[in-house]
């Protein structure tokens, strides 16, 4: 699902041109930058940045992930929001590490 949201694969599970670029990247820095840009442009990433009043995921407080999901993802239980927030936190930490 994340790969579809980030436009790395088509609905029929084939790599998009961008997904192919990520798959063929020679270093972590290159593919992390692509994924960061894609996530910032996704509904979730752009709404989270708007919520935090920042222009980059590098400025996000990753500790806000659980509350952000609880407030903005109708239908998710607190336990599901907490679990999914771990993914968001790990992504932001990786983006910051490679920045």
Image (cartoon, helix red, strand yellow):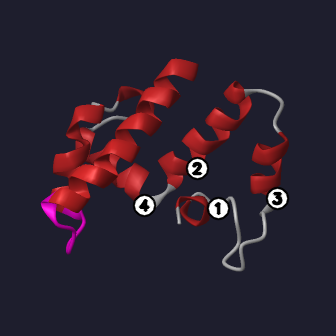
- Label 3 and label 2: CA atoms lie apart by 13 Å
Q: Does the magenta segment cover residue 75?
A: yes
Q: Residue at x 82, y 53 (%)?
A: 20
Count neighbours of disc 4 (C-alpha within 10 A) and say few if under 14, some if 14 to 19, many if 20 or more: few
Return the residue at label 1: 7
Which callout, 4 or 1, points at the residue further toward the start of the chain? Answer: 1
- Label 3 and label 1: CA atoms lie apart by 9 Å
- Contact flag, marks 2 and 1 (Cβ < 8 Å): yes
- Label 2 and label 4: CA atoms lie apart by 10 Å
Name the secondary structure under disc 1. Answer: loop
Task: Quadrant for residue 43, please give it.
Answer: bottom left
Question: Where does the image place residue 63, in percent across and percent down from the top left?
Answer: 23, 33
Return the residue at label 2: 38
Q: Main secondary structure of the magenta part?
A: loop
Which callout, 2 or 4, points at the residue further toward the start of the chain? Answer: 2
Name the secondary structure under disc 3. Answer: helix
Q: Of the numbered discs in the image, which one, if any, rests on residue 17? A: 3
Residues rendered magenta in the picture: 72-78
Considering the image in quadrants, where does the C terminus appear?
top right
Q: Is residue 48 left or right of residue 98?
A: left
- Label 2 and label 1: CA atoms lie apart by 7 Å
> In the rendered image of this protein, does residue 92 appear above or below residue 12?
above
Name the secondary structure under disc 2. Answer: helix
Q: Of the numbered discs in the image, which one, if any, rests on residue 43? A: 4
Question: Where does the image place residue 94, in percent across and percent down from the top left?
Answer: 50, 29
């Amino acid at each position: 699902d994340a790969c579809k949201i980030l436009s790395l694969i088509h609905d029929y599970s084939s790599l998009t041109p961008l997904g192919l670029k990520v798959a063929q990247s020679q270093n972590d820095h290159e593919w992390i930058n692509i994924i960061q840009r894609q996530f910032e442009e996704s509904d979730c990433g752009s709404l989270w940045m708007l919520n935090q009043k920042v222009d980059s995921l590098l400025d996000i407080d990753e500790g806000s992930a659980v509350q952000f999901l609880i407030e903005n993802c109708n239908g998710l239980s607190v336990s599901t929001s907490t679990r999914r927030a771990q993914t968001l936190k790990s992504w932001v930490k990786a983006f910051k590490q490679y920045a």
